[in-house]
Amino acid sequence: MKFYFVRHGKTEWNLEGRYQGAQGDSALLPESYTDIHLLANFLSKVKIDHIYSSPIRRAYLTARTLADDLGGQIPVTTNPALKEFDLGLLEGQKFVDVEAQYPELIWAFRHDPSQYNAQVIQGESFLEVIARTNHFIQQLAQKATPTANYVIVSHGAALTAMIKSLLSVSLQDLRKDGGLSNTSLTTVETNDHGQTFQLLDWNNTSYLKRDLDQNDTI
C-alpha cells in the first residue's frame, strides 16, 4: 500500500516569502498549473484509488487539477485533518520580519521542533499536528486493501511533520532532511496496514525539470 504525499503548488505568498498556515491562503501562481500537469504525467502509470486533500483552497485546487489531469475519474475528498499548521500571529507576515521578531521560535520550527513553543504565537504545536494527521493516515491504512494507492495533498510543514512521524523519527529530528518543495512528491509504503511505514522517495521534484528557487521549499 503506497501513499503519495504532494505539497500544493506554489502560491503568491510562497513567492513573496510570507507565512501561510491554516488561516491564511493565497492564489496558486499560473506556472503552478504547469507543475501540477508535469506531476500528473509522472504519476500517470500509477493506479490511484483516491485523492485526499486539505480543504484549504491552494491544496484543494492542486488536488482537483491533478485529478483532472489524471483523467477526471479519481475521487477527491477533503479532510480538515490535512490542513497546514495554524500559525496564529504569523499568518501573512513576511519571513524576514518574523525571523527578526521571533528568532529562537523560528529556529526551533525549522531545525528542532522539540523546542518549538507554539503558544508564543497562539498557534498549533507539532504534537497537535502530528496527532491529527497521523490518525487520518493510519485510519486510511487500516481500512484499505493491501494494494491501494492514495494521493495526499497537503502543506509543507504539516507534511514534513506527518511523514517523518509516521516513519518514527523523533520530534527533535523531524527537520533533519529539510523541508518539502512546492508540487513535490514523497512516497511512503506500509505492508502492515499502517502499523509501520517505510520511506521510498523524499521530496522528488525531478519531473519539474527546472532548478528550484529558495522560496520553493519550506
Image: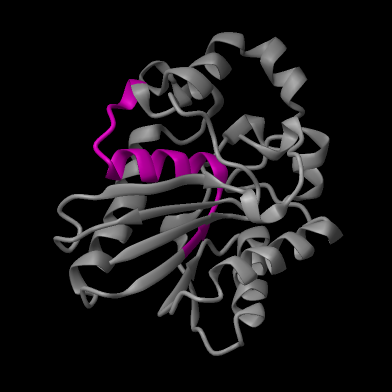
Residue 74 x, y percent position in the rendering: 51, 84
Q: Nearer the viewer, residue 64 or 119?
A: 64
Q: Is residue 129 visible?
A: no
Identify the residue at the far right of this view: 30
Q: Quadrant of the N terminus?
A: bottom left
| Dominant secondary structure, magenta | helix
The type of colouring in the image is one colour
Tell me residue 61's x, y (percent).
67, 68
x 39%, y 33%: residue: 126
Vertical arrangement, residue 32 with respect to residue 198, above or below: below
Q: Which residue is located at x 53 percent, y 44 percent?
A: 203
Which residue sits at x=61%, y=87%? Answer: 71
Would residue 74 be found to the left or right of residue 16 on screen?
left
- Quarter assignment of residue 190: bottom left
Q: Say if the magenta span includes residue 163.
A: yes
How far from the left and from the top, in percent, is residue 81?
Answer: 41, 57
Q: Nearer the viewer, residue 84 or 45?
A: 45
Stretch of the chain drawn in magenta: 152-172
Residues 181 and 53: in front is: 181
Query: Is the residue 101 above or below the residue 189 in the image?
Result: above
Above or below, 158 against 142 in this view is above
- State which quarter of the image contains the C terminus: top right
The quadrant holding residue 50 is bottom left
